[in-house]
Image (tube, helix red, strand yellow):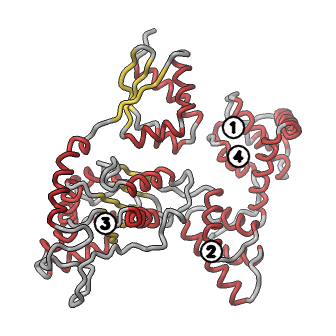
Amino acid sequence: MTRDHTTVWDSCLQTIRRNVNTQSFKTWFEPIRPVRLADEALTIQVPNKFFYEWLEEHYVHLLKTTIREELGSKGRLEYQIFMGRQAAMKKNNEDREKSSKKDAEPGFIAGSQIKNPFVIPGIKKLKIDSQLNSNYLFTNYIEGDCNRLARSAGQAIAKNPGGTAFNPLVIFGDVGLGKTHLAHAIGNEVLQQLPNKTVLYVSSEKFTNQIIQSIKNNAVNDFVNFYQLVDVLIVDDIQFLANKQKTQEIFFHIFNQLHQNGKQIILTSDRPPKDMNGMEERLLSRFKWGLSADVQAPDLETRIAILESKISKEGFNLPSDVIEFICYNIKSSIRELEGVLVSLVAQSSLNRREIDMDLTKRVIQNFVNQINKEITVDFIQELVAEHFNVPVEKLKGQTRKRSIVVARQLSMYLAKKMTDKSLKAIGENFGGRDHSTVIYSCTAVQNLLDTDAVFKDTVAELEKKIQLSLNG
C-alpha cells in the first residue's frame, strides 16, 4: 500500500507518544506538520528555529529511531521552518525601530511633554524605572518539566528581545506557580545583558488605573506615547483586562505599535488566550502571534529542589525528612511552599525549638485539609503510574507491553507489602485478576530486585514516597 507523508508521520507519532510524557508530546510534537515524503526523506514543518533546535537537542535519537522504523535504514528526517507574519514584516520592523531610536534615547523619555505615569506629580524623573523585583532571577527560578518550555523561551527572549518568534510570550498557569517570577527574571536578564534597553513591568490593575487617570486628565496621547518608548513591556495578569473596553482599546494600540517596531511583549495570565472570556477578538488574535507557554504544578523532585533553594537562600537548615514531608503534602502551589517555610521559621523562633517532624505536621495542617493516613491500592497504582508515566487504566488493562507489565507487577508487589489487603482483593483492583497472578507478579519483582540494581533503587524510591504519606 502506498504511504504518504501524513500516514507516515501519524505512525511516527504513535511511537513517539509511547516514549515521551503527555506534556512533552503536546508541546513538542502536536504542533509539527508533515509536508512531503520523497526519496526516503520525510519533511516536517516546525513553528520556528528554536523549536527545531530543541528537537535536535532533546529528541534527535528518538526521531532518528522512529523514522528508520517507518522508512527503513536509509530513512531520514528533514525540517522546514515555518515563515509566518513576523518574518515577512522583519525588514519593515527594523526600519521603523531605527527611525524610532533617532527620536528617543533608549531608557529615557523624549522631551518633557510626555508624562511618566509611574512618577508622582511634582517629582521630576526622566529615566524609566523598570518596576522589576531584583530578587526574581533565572538563577533562583528552578527548572523542571513543569516550566521548561516557558523558561527556555524566556532565556531566548532575554538574549534577543523582540528578535525571536516568541513575541508576544504569553505565560499562563494557575496561581502561585511562578509566572510572575519568570516574567521578572526575563526583564532582569535583559537589563543585565542589554543595559541600554528599556524594560517596564506593570500589573494589569495598575495599567487600568493609569488609563483612568489619563482619561481624567485628558492625557491619553501622552500615556500611549510613554508606553511606546519601552523596548520590553511586561504586563502581569492580563486576564483582568476582560470586559474593560476602553482599556483594551488603548492596550491594543500600544501592542500594535510595540510589535510593529520590533519591541518585545510579555504577558502573564491564569489561562491560555483561547479561554480569556471578555477579551476583544482582535486582541486575542494578537496574543496568539507568538508563543503561549504554560507553567504547571511542579512534580515532587522539582518541589524539593525549589524548597532547598529557598532554604539555602535564607541561610538555615531543615532535616531532609522534613523537606520531603512538606513537598509531598504541598503539591499545587510554590507560594504555599513558601508559606509553610515562613510559618515553620516563625513557629521555631517563637517557641524556641528546633524544626522537627512534629512541628512540621502541626504547621502543615494549616495548609492542607487532610494528609494521607491510609495507604490504599488505588494510591499505590497512581504513584507507580506517575513514576513510569503511564495511565492508571493501563495497569488495570490487558496490555502486555513490557513497561506496562513491569509497572503493574510492581504495583501488586507494593500493594501486598504495604497494605493489609488480601491477594484476592489486590487482584480485583487490577482488572479482576486472581490471586495466583498477584503471587506471580510479586515473585517476578523480587527476582528483579535481586538482579537489577537500578530497579532496586526505583522500588526503594517509591517505598520512601509511600512512607512519607504515612507520616501524616
Q: Position of residue 451 (x, y in %)?
A: 86, 36
Q: Is residue 112 above or below residue 461?
A: below
Between the residue at mark 3 and the residue at mark 1, the CA separation in whole angstroms equals 59 Å
The type of residue carrying mark 3 is: Asn
Q: Mark 2 or 1 closer to N-term?
A: 2
At a point 44% along the width and 64% down the height, the residue shown is 185
The type of residue carrying mark 4 is: Val
Q: Position of residue 372 (x, y in %)?
A: 71, 62
**Labels 4 and 1 touching (C-beta < 8 A):** no
Tag 2 residue = 340
Q: Mark 4 or 1 closer to N-term?
A: 4
Q: Is residue 366 above or below residue 52?
A: below
The answer to whether residue 269 of the structure is visible from this angle is: yes
Dot 2: what SS? helix
Give the number of the disc on residue 196. 3
Give the number of the disc on residue 396. 1
Q: Mark 4 or 2 closer to N-term?
A: 2
Mark 3 or 1, closer to the camera: 3
